[in-house]
Amino acid sequence: MNNEILLRLMIMRNGKVYEAYLDERLSFRENFDYLQQLIGEDLSSAIVYDPNKKLFLDENVPLKEYRISFFMLLELFV
């Protein structure tokens, strides 16, 4: 699939780290709806933080608009 991006997601509450391919055509919110079914974590209220750029990302914007680099770490505040 051409529209996937591999990301490392750290849930700050418990320190768990997940590596997942997300669809860059979808928003974080839409990707998280699928991801939470697979990992069993409630991500419905997750806030995404980019520690490299030191800013919070809008969960409703398609990932391709962020130009996220391959396999970068994002922190999730749930």
Image (spheres, rainbow, N blue to C red):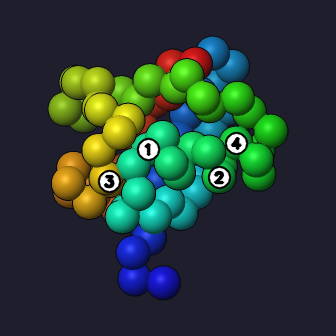
| Mark earlier in primary sequence (4, 1) | 1
In three-dimensional space, the C-alpha distance between marks 1 and 2, rounded to whole angstroms, equals 10 Å
58 lies left or right of 6: left
Amino acid beneath label 4: Gln
Amino acid beneath label 3: Leu
Number of marks drawn: 4
Say which residue label 4 marks: 36
Say which residue label 1 marks: 28
| Mark earlier in primary sequence (1, 3) | 1
Say which residue label 2 marks: 34
24 lies left or right of 1: left
In three-dimensional space, the C-alpha distance between marks 1 and 3, rounded to whole angstroms, equals 7 Å
In three-dimensional space, the C-alpha distance between marks 4 and 1, rounded to whole angstroms, equals 12 Å
Dot 1 falls on a residue whose secondary structure is helix
Amino acid beneath label 2: Tyr
Establish if 75 lies above or below 12: below
In three-dimensional space, the C-alpha distance between marks 4 and 2, rounded to whole angstroms, equals 6 Å
Residue 72 visible, this angle: yes
Answer yes or no: do the residues labelled 1 and 3 have beta carbons within 8 Å?
Answer: yes
Q: Position of residue 8 (x, y in %)?
A: 50, 48
Answer yes or no: do the residues labelled 4 and 2 have beta carbons within 8 Å?
Answer: yes
Establish if 43 lies above or below 69: above
| Mark earlier in primary sequence (3, 2) | 2
76 lies left or right of 38: left
Say which residue label 3 marks: 63
